[in-house]
Each structure stands twice: as structure tokens, then as C-alpha cells.
Image (tube, rainbow, N blue to C red):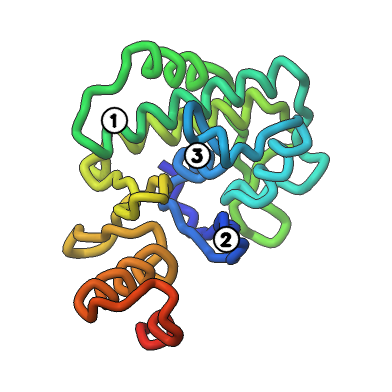
Amino acid sequence: MTETPNGLVLRSPEGTRFVFDAGALCLEFLTTGGPGVLSRSETLHTPDDLATWCTASRLRLAPGDVHISGSEFRAARWLRDALSRFARAVAHGRPPNPRDVDEVNQAAQLPPLVPQIAADGQHGSHLPADAFQVLSSVARDAVGLFTGPLAARVRECGAPDCSLVFVDTSRPGRRRWCVMERCGNRHKVRALRARRGTEPHEAGAEAAVS
């Protein structure tokens, strides 16, 4: 599993920007949308969208570093959807679908991005690369996560209207929310309103909760 710390800047349906750290490269990939109801938040519409994710993710690949063909883009969508179902199955204690496991394993068999030491002494990759190398790196990250000790720490956000998946790296292992400042705070607001018996439109309720 990729250990590089990172955070993606995401935008909520309400238009609020927030920083989300999924804790693993493969789970960062799930922020691009997914199958079924997750398609409403789809962001991978073209190969350029995949390139944009490569730049924003912990891979930190610059535009133009990765060549993405049409077939590679379609494979990216298939892998992303398989990983989405796989991760949610693990998060809820269910066995993953064997077809999703096969999809991940097939992607992991391809040559991954080749690591190297960048000019600034930081971790980098031998470039340019093709998208299949990116997908292999994502799939291998998933293999490491779902077969390792942190598999039991894979969580789906506890908010009923949030589907973000993350690795709970907190010491007590009781993290419930994708981001405390977003879904955690909204939960506090709802609980406060329920205790006070107030209406959702009451002014100042959200501001009163930090």
C-alpha cells in the first residue's frame, strides 16, 4: 500500500471544498465516482479526466506524464468500479465478488509505474508512462491493503449521504467520518437539533457547533 501522505481537495454536492485523505492510493481512485448510485458523482468522462486525477492523487504525476488511450481509459473505469464494490464489501464485513477480485488481480499483473529518486531527492516515477502502469500501481496498492493488517480498518463514511471510503489509521480505530469537519460536524448539528427539538432552518445552529 502506498504510504505517501496526501489529501485530495474534493467538492461536496453543496459546493463546499474540503480535504480528504483516503489513506491509500486505491481508495483515492474511488473519489472519481463508481457504479450504480455512485454514478451521480462520476468525474471520469474522458481520458483527460483520468490524467487530472493522476495529478491530484498521491501519484503527483504532471499533465503529459501519462499517455492514456481509449482502451486504457475504459479499463480504468472497469477497475475503479471493481475496486468500489470490493472496498465496500470489505468495509461492511462481506466477502468481495470473485469477479471484482479477478479484475483487481488482472490489473496487478501488468507492469506498474517504475519508482525512482527524483531530482529533488523525493520519491518519483520513471516517465513518461502509460495508463496501464498507473492502473497496475493502483491494483497492487489494493492487493497490499486488502490482504494486509489494515484491511480491518477500511471504513465507509458513516454519514447516510456520503460514500467515501478510507483507511482508519487512528490509534483507537473508531473513526466514523470521511472528514470530521464535514460529515462529523453535520452529524453534530443534526444531533443538537434533535436534542433541542429545533427546525433545520433555525439560524445559528450550525455555527454553534465546532
Which is more N-terminal, label 1 or label 2?
2
Depth check: give the residue in front, 207 or 203: 203
Instruction: Single out the mark in the foreground, 3 or 2.
Output: 2
* Residue bearing the label numbered 3: 30
The residue sitting at 69% across, 48% down in the picture is 55
On screen, 92 above or below 117? above
Q: In the displayed structure, would residue 193 be above or below residue 50?
A: below
| Looking at the image, residue 45 lies above or below residue 208 | above
Three-letter amino acid code of the residue under disc 1: Ala
Instruction: Examine the rendering and report whether any part of residue 182 can be seen.
Output: yes
Label 1, label 3: how far apart the Cα atoms are:
14 Å
**Residue at image point 55% right, 20% down:** 78
| Residue 131 in the figure: left or right of residue 152 | right
Of callouts 3 and 2, which one flags the residue occurring earlier in the amino acid sequence?
Answer: 2
Question: What amino acid does circle 2 point to?
Answer: Glu
Q: Position of residue 174 (x, y in %)?
A: 20, 60
- Residue where numbered disc 1 is placed: 89
Q: Residue at x 59, y 25 (%)?
A: 77
Task: Measuring from the top left, give residue 3's x and y in whole percent.
Answer: 43, 51
* Secondary element type, mark 2: loop
Query: What percent of the width, then of the height, locates residue 26?
Result: 47, 38
